[in-house]
Image (tube, helix red, strand yellow):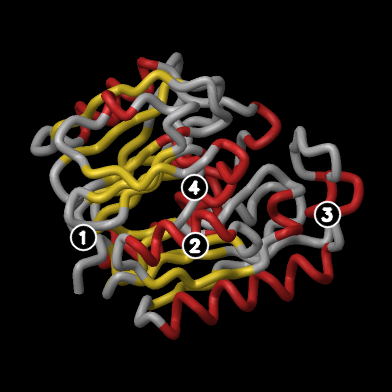
């Protein structure tokens, strides 16, 4: 399998999900029941593509906890626990550490990003030969430096971004192919990659998850992105994640993959 993970952690939305931290103008229109339905569909797609899914319990005190990408960067030999740049999410990572301690045979050594570093998983792009860390409002340079120190065998590069998270404007697929919104993320930050350019008006579709065998999960409703992926030989799997869009989340946000190369 050419994807970088075969296992992922997920967590369903809580009763309080509608109180999540969001800048989306439709955040007050979140339908929690629909969000749960969309989350079940998301999990079903992962499983249908052969990904083993570990479903963790909801955290009612943390409305944003459905966005499992952010608390950590997981690998089969180590787990780097981040430190939230968004203080209203602080505490989620401590619960995740306790849960991971029950799965040490899966993730290996647990390491922590310490103050003054901040690191959120939504700013980390893992490829098969390098890691890129977005320097954003949520992740700072010190957080990227600590991640690099924990991964001495990997090339770790910092990428400046004005986006909420780096994964909001770029996504690694396979064979050095990367989706990128080049008006928002500079392609020169990723030397020796091939780019599928996503137009700015469809940037939300750039938050995509590669599931192996040329399959790419993307949010539904972005026809130009779908067309570009097909033209590049990929098989888009469209999913409605409208309620997570309202919460400033996307396709990658909903799972924490365990990367085989880390």
* Above-or-below relation of 46 to 148: below
Side of 38 relative to 147 (left or right): right
**Would residue 110 be visible to someone looking at this image?**
no
- Few, some or many C-alpha atoms within 10 Å of disc 3 (few <14, some 14-19, many ≥20)? some
C-alpha span from label 2 to label 3: 33 Å
Name the N-terminal-most of marks 2 and 3.
Answer: 3
Mark 1 or mark 3: which is in front? 1
* Above-or-below relation of 62 to 190: below
The picture places residue 106, in percent across and down from the top left corner, at 28, 65
Q: Which mark is residue 206?
A: 4
Return the residue at label 3: 16
Which element type, helix, strand or loop, lies under badge 3?
Answer: loop
Return the residue at label 1: 260
C-alpha span from label 2 to label 1: 28 Å
Side of 164 relative to 215 (left or right): right
Which element type, helix, strand or loop, lies under badge 2?
Answer: helix
User: Residue at 20% across / 27% down in the picture?
Assistant: 149
- Few, some or many C-alpha atoms within 10 Å of disc 4 (few <14, some 14-19, many ≥20)? many
Name the N-terminal-most of marks 1 and 3.
Answer: 3
Mark 4 or mark 1: which is in front? 4
Which element type, helix, strand or loop, lies under badge 4?
Answer: helix
Quarter where residue 231 is shown: bottom left
Name the N-terminal-most of marks 4 and 1.
Answer: 4
Name the N-terminal-most of marks 2 and 4.
Answer: 4
Q: Are marks 4 and 1 in contact (CB under 8 Å)?
A: no
Foreground residue among 166 and 76: 166
The picture places residue 128, in percent across and down from the top left corner, at 17, 50
User: Residue at 45% across / 14% down in the picture?
Assistant: 116
Return the residue at label 2: 226
Mark 2 or mark 3: which is in front? 2
C-alpha span from label 3 to label 4: 27 Å
Q: Are marks 2 and 1 in contact (CB under 8 Å)?
A: no
């Amino acid at each position: 399998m050419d994807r970088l993970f075969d296992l992922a952690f997920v967590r369903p939305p809580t009763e309080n999900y509608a109180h999540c931290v969001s800048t989306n103008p439709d955040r007050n229109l979140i339908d929690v029941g629909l969000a749960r339905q969309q989350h079940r569909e998301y999990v079903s797609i992962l499983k249908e593509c052969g990904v083993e899914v570990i479903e963790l319990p909801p955290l009612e005190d943390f409305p944003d906890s459905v966005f499992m990408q952010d608390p950590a960067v997981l690998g089969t030999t180590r787990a780097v626990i981040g430190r939230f740049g968004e203080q209203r999410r602080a505490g989620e990572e401590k619960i995740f550490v306790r849960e991971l301690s029950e799965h040490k045979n899966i993730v290996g050594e647990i390491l922590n990003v310490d103050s003054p570093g901040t690191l959120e998983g939504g700013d980390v792009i893992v490829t098969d030969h390098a890691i890129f860390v977005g320097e954003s409002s949520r992740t700072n340079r010190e957080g990227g430096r600590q991640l690099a120190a924990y991964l001495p065998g990997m090339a770790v590069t910092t990428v400046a971004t004005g986006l909420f998270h780096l994964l909001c404007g770029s996504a690694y697929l396979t064979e050095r192919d990367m989706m990128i919104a080049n008006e928002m993320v500079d392609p020169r930050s990723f030397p020796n990659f091939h780019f599928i350019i996503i137009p700015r008006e469809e940037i939300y579709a750039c938050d995509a998850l590669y599931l192996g065998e040329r399959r790419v999960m993307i949010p539904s409703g972005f026809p130009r992105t779908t067309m570009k992926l097909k033209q590049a030989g990929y098989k888009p799997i469209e999913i409605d994640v409208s309620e997570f869009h309202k919460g400033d989340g996307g396709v990658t946000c909903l799972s924490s993959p365990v990367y085989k190369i880390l």
